[in-house]
Image (spheres, rainbow, N blue to C red):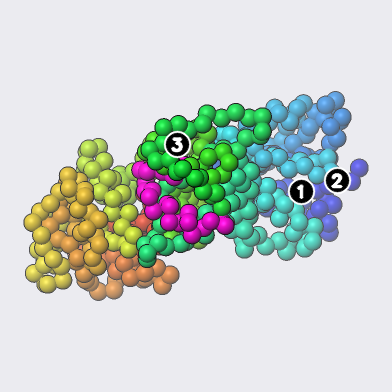
């Protein structure tokens, strides 16, 4: 019997093991493009057939397999009597061809978009290998296409959601305003399936509206009734039935559109994938959207859990500013002195001290003008609209805007003077960055 892997390599001076590691490295690169933080990329395993084995041979003698892991360059070899004996097999993606297989165990429970993304990855990898040869494979330019294909297939297959329609809807404005709404979509079942129908909607339309591209303008108008708390409800027939304040059912997915071409879909209760900056991002499940302790540099260790929670709440509110903003955070003494310096220089507007945690309704107003808001670690603010000054001491990023570059420069310039602050930069494109003297973090607070 022809050895499938050797045949795939052809005349290349590579071993089967080299091929397996190449698959591993390219798959890891795909996941780094997908997960919202590199360190949250799962420590996956990939199990390969060591040799072609028919089902009859496998049942009689077992399946010899080789395993590669994300972080190790050592191969593991074993024999299993049944493929279901492979750890987490039921939640993995399995590729079959010519009596060989590859099992991708990406450490997720249940069905998810990652299974469909992995399928697209395998299809493209083996297609290119057969056409161009292993040394000429180029996958990086295909990652976004694979991810988009997998996401589209998952949500259409399980929820009958047309992702292209969602993208188009999220890009539409209404009277000049970007979209801000929540939509509940039921999971699709076969004709024999049964589902608990929603009852007691707060608003019920007398005539339901098809949730489809043909009614795009009408739907864009209707979703203006919704926000993060009040959700549009789609029924089993794919029509807008009304609106509710209730939380989504376990059998529904929640689409939260929060800006132009920016949305988050929560599925199966805890699964979450977002689209912003023209990329999809998988989010790991966590009790809060983010932890302020991680992003506040040297201040983190000195703050109580209560103060951290207060800062998280204020930062989350500031992140909802659609036109972007900057928050400069520091200890009370330094923020007081810096506010006074900037106000005396006539590059900031002083205000009577206000606690932004206690007066959270003010955040959207004071962040709506150009310039930075200065706030201490007790959430007290006495300076708004500040122009961040300082010499250019840090190399900028031409791919980022003025807010980002001026904040990075300001934080580093003040650090040279032994004045330590943290900058929270909310860009118009929906990204949120935390800037300290040592690190810049991309954070998700949506």
How far separated are the C-alphas under marks 1 and 2? 10 Å
Q: Which mark is residue 3?
A: 2
Mark 2, secondary structure of its residue = loop
Q: Give coordinates of residue 394: x percent, y percent.
A: 32, 69
Q: Which mark is residue 248?
A: 3
Q: Give coordinates of residue 350: x percent, y percent.
A: 11, 63
The answer, for residue 25, to whether it is visible in the render is no
Residue plotted at (45% across, 43% down): 205
Residue plotted at (83% across, 56% down): 10
User: Mark 1 or 2, which is nearer the eye?
Assistant: 2
**First-in-chain label (1 vs 2):** 2
Residue that mark 1 sits on: 16
Question: Is 30 positioned to the left or the right of 225 in the image?
Answer: right
Question: Is 125 positioned to the left or the right of 298 in the image?
Answer: right
Q: Residue furthest right?
A: 1
Q: Are marks 1 and 2 in contact (CB under 8 Å)?
A: yes
Q: Give coordinates of residue 163: x percent, y percent.
A: 56, 53
User: Mark 1 or 3, which is nearer the eye?
Assistant: 3
Residue plotted at (29% across, 65% down): 407
How far separated are the C-alphas under marks 3 and 2? 51 Å
Total numbered labels = 3
Quarter of the image for the N terminus: give it. top right
**First-in-chain label (3 vs 2):** 2
Q: Give coordinates of residue 216: x percent, y percent.
A: 51, 58
Q: Tell me if mark 1 has few (under 14), some (14-19) or many (20+) residues whose alpha carbon lies within 10 angstroms of its own.
A: some
**First-in-chain label (1 vs 3):** 1
Query: Which region of the structure is painted magenta?
Result: 213-233
């Amino acid at each position: 019997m022809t050895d499938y892997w050797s045949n795939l390599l052809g005349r290349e001076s590579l071993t089967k093991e080299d091929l397996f590691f190449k698959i591993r490295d390219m798959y890891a690169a795909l996941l780094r493009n997908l997960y919202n933080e590199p360190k949250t990329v799962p420590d996956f395993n990939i199990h390969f057939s060591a040799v072609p084995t028919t089902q009859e041979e496998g049942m009689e003698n077992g399946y010899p397999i080789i395993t590669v892991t994300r972080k190790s360059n050592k191969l593991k070899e074993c024999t299993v009597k049944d493929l279901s004996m492979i750890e987490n097999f039921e939640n993995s993606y399995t590729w079959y061809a010519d009596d060989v297989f590859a099992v991708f165990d990406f450490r997720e429970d249940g069905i998810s978009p990652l299974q469909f993304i992995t399928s697209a990855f395998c299809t493209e990898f083996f297609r290119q290998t057969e056409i161009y040869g292993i040394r000429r494979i180029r996958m990086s330019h295909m990652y976004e296409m694979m991810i988009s294909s997998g996401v589209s297939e998952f949500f259409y297959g399980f929820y009958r959601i047309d992702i292209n329609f969602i993208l188009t809807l999220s890009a539409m404005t209404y009277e000049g305003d970007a979209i801000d709404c929540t939509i509940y979509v039921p999971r699709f079942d076969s004709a024999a399936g049964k589902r608990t129908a929603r009852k007691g909607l707060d608003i019920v339309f007398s005539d339901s509206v098809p949730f489809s591209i043909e009614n795009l303008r009408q739907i864009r108008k209707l979703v203006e009734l919704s926000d993060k708390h009040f959700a549009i409800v789609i029924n089993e027939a794919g029509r807008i039935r009304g609106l509710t304040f209730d939380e989504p059912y376990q059998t529904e997915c929640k689409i939260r559109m929060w800006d132009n071409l920016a949305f988050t879909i929560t599925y199966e209760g805890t699964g979450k994938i977002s689209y912003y900056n023209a990329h999809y991002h998988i989010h790991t499940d966590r009790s809060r959207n983010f932890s302020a302790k991680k992003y506040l540099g040297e201040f983190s260790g000195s703050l109580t859990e209560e103060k951290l929670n207060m800062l998280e709440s204020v930062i989350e509110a500031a992140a909802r500013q659609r036109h972007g903003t900057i928050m400069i955070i520091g200890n009370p003494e330094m923020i007081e002195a810096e506010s006074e310096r900037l106000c005396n220089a006539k590059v900031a507007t002083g205000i009577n001290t206000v606690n932004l945690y206690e007066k959270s309704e003010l955040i959207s107003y004071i962040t709506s003008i150009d310039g930075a808001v200065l706030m201490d670690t007790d959430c007290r603010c006495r300076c708004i609209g500040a122009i961040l000054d300082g010499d250019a001491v840090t190399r900028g990023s031409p791919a980022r805007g003025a807010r980002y570059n001026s904040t990075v420069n300001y934080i580093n310039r003040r650090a040279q003077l032994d004045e330590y602050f943290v900058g929270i930069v909310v860009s118009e494109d929906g990204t949120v960055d935390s800037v300290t003297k040592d690190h810049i973090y991309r954070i998700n607070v949506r």
